[in-house]
Amino acid sequence: MGGAGTGTGTGTVGTAFLIAAAPAGRGRAMDAASVLPALAAVPPGVLTGTATATVVELADPLDPQTVLTRLRAAAASPGPLLVCLAGQLHLDRRQQRPHLALARTTPATLRYTALPWHWLAGELAVRPPGTTTVVADLAADPELWARLTAAPDLLSLGPGPLLYGRVTPAPRRGDPMTPDYLRSWAELWRSGARLPYATLHAESAAHAASAVPESRLLAPAPAPVSPQEQDPHPAILAAAMAGRHGEAAAVAAAWEREALRGHGPRSVEAVHWTEVRADLARLAGDPARSCELWLAAAEARLGLRQPTDDPDVEGAVDRAHHQWEQIGDPARARALGPTLVALRRRVPGRQPGALAALTRRMAD
């Protein structure tokens, strides 16, 4: 529901630093690397909210100095930086500081084979405020989990970076846990949605809570705003996630009317709220209405002279196509099909064969 990156200038190049780390063998509490294919499947520019982006990926690194060197190079980039981090945290009992376990980390070698959390904070602290976002899915050992209760700011990265995340207690036995929270971010990105980070966090946290109810959520404190400047998206999403779909749709419709009044029907602001209502229809289990609204959004963006390969145009058509495939009523699907086919001819998207698959389905 809205723009997602920390910088969206057409000439801006972003950097995505993807790191998944966990000890080998019996010390592994999280299958951290399992999320990397899902993240790698997201277009780099979607990760950072920029036209283009560089991706750096580290899977189960061995040495903290290597991680530090790669992180330092990523942090030196001038554009927006997104750090996606999956792994497990352990507490250094001597200094009472968290460390990110790496592949060779054991309890006895923690201080020499793990990445100190304050190293991460230190490298990101030098970046300009508002240019850095960290998304973390972490399992905490018993000592660190207990310490978080007494010191909730233990994982703070300082005032510059925005930190969104989930911390769960590491399982004491059995199979390693999976990074479901971060995987949900990847799935939402891949769906074509351009959602604000706060919305991605809220929806992913709700999804992951069904698998691991006991967790701590990490999110930036909301900035003070006035009744006119308040961001309505979190409240709308909260209502939808709680099953109050009528309430969520009514609030979104009210904001759409304000956008129409203030900016006119042929405005990006008005199109944005059409897309919000389309996503709410998806959450309410009404794929036909969602498809209809995504089609309207795509046509409106094309009417605003956005090119057919614009990510927002492609995303709207892709989501309309996906929702059309979920429609259970054949008559409703047939009614929406010609409009979707016409748009698909103009906006083929990045999935090879999408138009051919659509026309075959229409012919069935």
Image: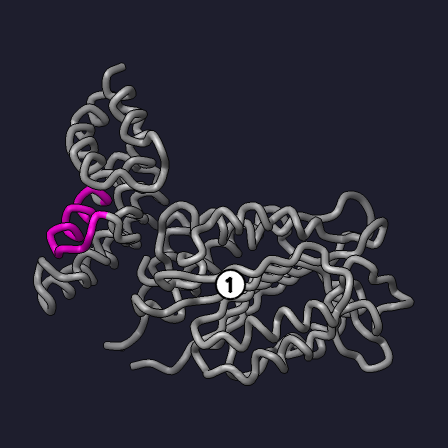
Instruction: Tell me which corner region of the image, top left, top right, bottom left or bottom right, holds residue 289.
Output: top left
| Residue 31 coordinates in the image, percent (x, y) | 70, 49
Drawn side of residue 71 relative to residue 233, left or right = right
Q: Give the range drawn in magenta.
A: 294-308
Give 182 or 347, whichever is nearer the viewer: 347
Q: Find out whether residue 307 is within the magenta segment.
A: yes
Q: Is residue 294 above or below residue 54?
A: above
| Residue 339 coordinates in the image, percent (x, y) | 15, 33
Q: In this view, does 287 lie above or below 316?
A: above
Q: Find out whether residue 299 is within the magenta segment.
A: yes
Give 306 or 280, whichever is nearer the viewer: 306
Drawn side of residue 262 relative to residue 286, left or right = left
Residue at 24% x, 44% y: name it: 294
Residue at 46% x, 50% y: name it: 42
Q: In this view, does 78 lie above or below 295?
A: below
Give 279 or 122, whichever is nearer the viewer: 122
- Residue beneath disc 1: 16
Q: Can residue 234 be seen in this view?
A: no
Residue at 77% x, 43% y: name it: 175
Q: In which quarter of the image is the N terminus?
A: bottom left
Q: In which quarter of the image is the C terminus?
A: top left
